[in-house]
Image: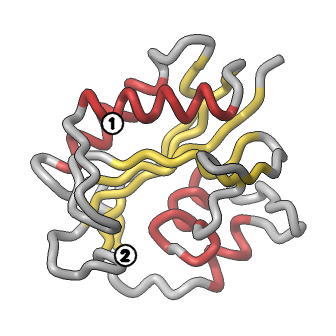
């Protein structure tokens, strides 16, 4: 059985736009997974730790037969291939990939929380997700388009 999952991507070290674009393409090479859509690239101001370059962000949609945890493992493998190091929370990074939504599943364990717990508070997630799937409904019934329309977009701009 396959599901539609949405993946958030971001990078701010090296050629961030190229890294995000290449990582989106790499999603399609995961086993039992097919890339079915991608947003534009967006530039966003850093969150948390502010003394770092702006980020390039995007959201991709995949049709996958992988479990949510196997998908997460695949994302971690892609991050590692792009040289991801986890030095401290909100640190600059060559690539960050998060499972945002996995069909209509709700999941919370030590490795993974779905829907992503901070996605509804982040313009750099909601705006590209709304571009890709505006009528997608969150578990509480709100659409991604409505959430994106209401969020503060300060520091966010489309670059592609």
* Residue 86 coordinates in the image, percent (x, y): 28, 52
| Residue ID at (71%, 56%) | 115
| Residue situated in front as seen by the camera: 92 or 157 | 92
Q: Is residue 115 above or below residue 89?
A: above
Q: How many marks?
A: 2
Q: What colour scheme governs how the chains and residues are painted in the rendered image of this protein? A: secondary structure
**76 shown above or below 43:** above
Q: CA distance from mark 1 to mark 2?
A: 23 Å
Of helix, strand and loop, which one carries label 2? strand
Give left or right: position of 4 versus 78.
right
N-terminal-most mark, 1 or 2: 1
Q: Quadrant of residue 91?
A: bottom left
1 or 2: mark nearer the eye: 1
- Which residue occupies the extreme right position in the image? 141
Rendered location of residue 12, percent (x, y): 21, 58
Specify the farthest residue to the left.
14
- Residue under label 2, please give it: 156
Q: Residue furthest top?
A: 31
Q: Position of residue 41 (x, y in %)?
A: 36, 54
User: In the structure shown, which secondary structural element does the residue marked by tag 1 occupy?
Assistant: helix
Residue at 23% x, 57% y is 87
Q: Residues within 10 Å of mark 1 (few under 14, many from 20)?
A: many
Q: Quadrant of the N terminus?
A: top right
Question: Residue 62 appears at what percent x and percent y?
Answer: 61, 31
Residue in view at x 23 percent, y 34 percent: 82
Q: Are marks 1 and 2 in contact (CB under 8 Å)?
A: no
Q: Is residue 58 above or below residue 2?
A: below
Instruction: Please give the name of the residue rendered at 64% of the width and 72% of the height, measured from the top-left corner.
Output: 120
Tell me, for residue 48, which label it has, or none. Answer: none
Q: Which mark is residue 79?
A: 1
């Amino acid at each position: 059985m396959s599901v539609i999952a949405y993946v958030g991507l971001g990078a701010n070290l090296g050629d961030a736009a190229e890294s995000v674009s290449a990582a989106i393409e790499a999603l399609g090479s995961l086993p039992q997974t097919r890339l079915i859509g991608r947003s534009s690239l967006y530039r966003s101001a850093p969150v948390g730790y502010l003394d770092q370059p702006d980020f390039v962000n995007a959201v991709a949609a995949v049709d996958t037969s992988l479990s949510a945890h196997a998908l997460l493992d695949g994302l971690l493998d892609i991050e590692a291939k792009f040289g991801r190091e986890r030095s401290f929370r909100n640190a600059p990074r060559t690539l960050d990939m998060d499972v945002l939504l996995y069909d209509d599943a709700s999941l919370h364990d030590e490795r993974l929380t779905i829907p992503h717990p901070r996605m509804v508070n982040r313009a750099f997630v909601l705006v590209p997700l709304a571009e890709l799937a505006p009528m997608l409904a969150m578990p509480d019934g709100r659409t991604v388009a409505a959430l994106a329309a209401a969020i503060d977009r300060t520091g966010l701009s489309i670059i592609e």
